[in-house]
Image (spheres, rainbow, N blue to C red):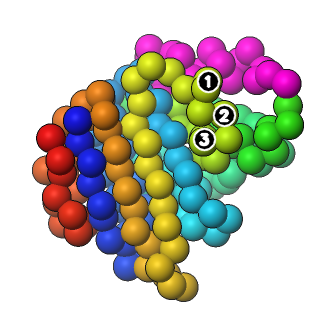
Amino acid sequence: MTKLLLQSPNPQATIQIGRILGTCLPRGSFVALDGILGAGKTQLVKGIACGLDEGGWAGLRSPTFTLMLSYHGGRCVLHHVDFYRLNEAPELPGEILEAMNSERDITVVEWASIWREVWPERYIHVSIEVEDDDKRRVAIDDPFSVCPEIPKALEEFTVQPAET
C-alpha cells in the first residue's frame, strides 16, 4: 500500500507528475481521479498520456460530453473517461465498463467517485486539491501496489512520504 501527498506549484508540474505516473503504470491499470472543476484533472491525464508516449497528448481534452475518448498512439491504449455528467444515469455504457476492466489498456476516470461502486477491484486513486491559483496538492493512494515505483519516481514532488 502506498499513499503520497505531493505539491504541484503550477500546471506544468501537474503535467510532469502525470508524465512520471504514466511511465510507471502497468497495462491494465485503472486510475480514479477526483478534484473540483479547474483542479487540474485533465492536465494530469495529459501528463499520463505523455508518459505512455502518446504523441497527441497536447491535444488531449476532457471527454465531458462524449464520456470517453481513447488514444492509441502510445505503448498501450489510454481510455480517458469522465463521469461528471453521469450522476443520474442508470448504467454505464458497455464500452466504458469494458475499458475500465481491460487487462491490456490503461483507463483514467475523471470524477471517479461519482460511481465508486463500478471501480475495478484494483485501482490507484488520485485526488487534486486547489491551494491557490496555480498550486495544487496531489494525493495518490495505491492501496493494492498496482505501481510500486510511484514513491521513488515522484520523490521530488513529495510533501508527505509514502505509507507502506
The residue pinned by badge 1 equals 118
The reply to whether residue 57 is in sight is no
Q: What element carries label 3?
A: helix
Residue 112, numbered label:
3
The residue stretch that appears in magenta: 90-106
Q: What element carries label 2?
A: helix
Report whether 114 appears left or right of 5. Answer: right
Residue 129, numbered label:
none
Q: Alpha-carbon neighbours of circle 1 within 10 Å: few (<14), some, or many (≥20)?
A: some
Residue 133, placed above or below residue 155: below
Q: Which of these two is toward me, 139 or 13?
A: 139
Quadrant containing the N terminus in the rendered view: top left
The residue pinned by badge 2 equals 115
Percent across and percent down for residue 61 are 67, 53
Q: Alpha-carbon neighbours of circle 2 within 10 Å: few (<14), some, or many (≥20)?
A: some
What residue is shown at x 51% (from left), y 16% (from top)? 102
Q: Are marks 3 and 2 in contact (CB under 8 Å)?
A: yes
Magenta highlight on residue 80: no
Say which quarter of the image contains residue 114: top right
Percent across and percent down for residue 73 are 51, 34
What residue is shown at x 71% (from left), y 18% (from top)? 95
What residue is shown at x 64% (from left), y 47% (from top)? 111
Gap between marks 1 and 2, in whole Å?
6 Å
Gap between marks 3 and 2, in whole Å?
6 Å
Report whether 36 appears left or right of 21. Answer: right
Residue 30, placed above or below residue 137: above
Q: Is mark 1 on a helix, strand or loop?
A: helix
Q: Which amino acid does label 3 sit on?
A: Ala
What residue is shown at x 49% (from left), y 67% (from top)? 129
Gap between marks 1 and 3, in whole Å?
9 Å
